[in-house]
Amino acid sequence: MDATAGRERLRQTFDTVAERYHEARPDYPDELFDALIAMTDLAPDEDTVLEIGCGTGKATLALARRGFRITGVELGAALAAQARRNLAGFPGVTVVNADIESWHPPAQAEFGLVFAATAWHWIDPVLRYRKAWELLRPGGHLAFWEASHVFPADGDPFFKQIQDVYDEIGEGMPDGDHYPTPETLASRGAEIAATGMFADVAIRRFDWEIRYTADEYIALLETFSGHIAMARWQRDRLYGEIRRRLAQRPDGTLRRHWGVVLHVARKR
């Protein structure tokens, strides 16, 4: 299977866990959205926002509560339906079930911000920057970030310890992968600049920690494409071992550290 086919197969797995996704995935810090608005000079009464891959509306809700008019484009029909339910109280929000690569906005539509929250890497890499550039009004901004697992020096050792089970079931870390800290989480600043389509590239980093019980952590894992695509026997072995090991801890929980690199750039 080539990279394009593999990406397409995996990005469609999320639609099978739409309701679970909204419950299990973490909310983004308020500070991230405050920084996004400050870095782009967005104004709710002036700017319309386009979200690529809005999922169930995890990030959409944060901007909707701040008064923005938003169009969310979501590939998965079940995810889009869940987003509409979650955002029903915001008449300024529209959710469209479509793939962003072929979607075209209504005539005369102009967006002051095009953004993606943990969805940018699923968009066709040949098209994504060009598509965002085409959708933005002159001087509008592109923004994206990915919620990633990071490993600070004082982080929970559980994740490195459980790698032996991933290796056993044939799902070990690929060669060259590492354990990024909040400070070393990779950015795409050079990639954005190299397109020649955007200027004033700015980067901000955020990190936070969430404590999970075994049930909560397994629910989270079941929203990750790689785990959804596993065979049942692989998940049973992995999840059983997670439960067993966490049961040996006094409080039965683990600490997972999340990191985000917020990228913002202005359309040339």
Image: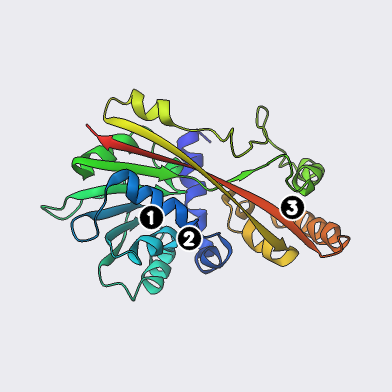
The earlier-in-sequence mark between 1 and 2 is 2
Q: Which residue is mark 1?
A: 75
The amino acid beneath tag 2 is Asp
Relative to residue 163, is residue 44 drawn left or right? Answer: left
Tell which residue pokes out farthest to the left in this image: 108
Q: Specify few, some or many for label 2: CA neighbours under 10 Å numbering under 14, 14-19, or 20 or more.
A: many
Instruction: Where is residue 15? Give x, y as percent.
Output: 48, 60
Instruction: Where is residue 149? Give x, y as percent.
Output: 62, 45
> Which element type, helix, strand or loop, lies under badge 1?
loop
- For the point 82% across and 56% down, the residue is 241
Instruction: Where is residue 109? Give x, y as percent.
Output: 15, 53
Residue 101 in sight in this render: no
The earlier-in-sequence mark between 3 and 2 is 2
The amino acid beneath tag 1 is Leu
**Residue 93 badge:** none
Q: Are marks 1 and 2 in contact (CB under 8 Å)?
A: yes
The amino acid beneath tag 3 is Gln
Q: Which residue is mark 3?
A: 234
> Which element type, helix, strand or loop, lies under badge 2?
helix
Q: Is residue 170 above or below residue 47?
A: above
The earlier-in-sequence mark between 3 and 1 is 1
**Residue 15 badge:** 2
- For the point 82% across and 42% down, the residue is 164
Q: Is residue 115 above or below residue 201?
A: below
Q: Specify few, some or many for label 1: CA neighbours under 10 Å numbering under 14, 14-19, or 20 or more.
A: many
Q: Rounded to the nearest whole Å, what is the CA distance between mark 3 and mark 2?
A: 21 Å
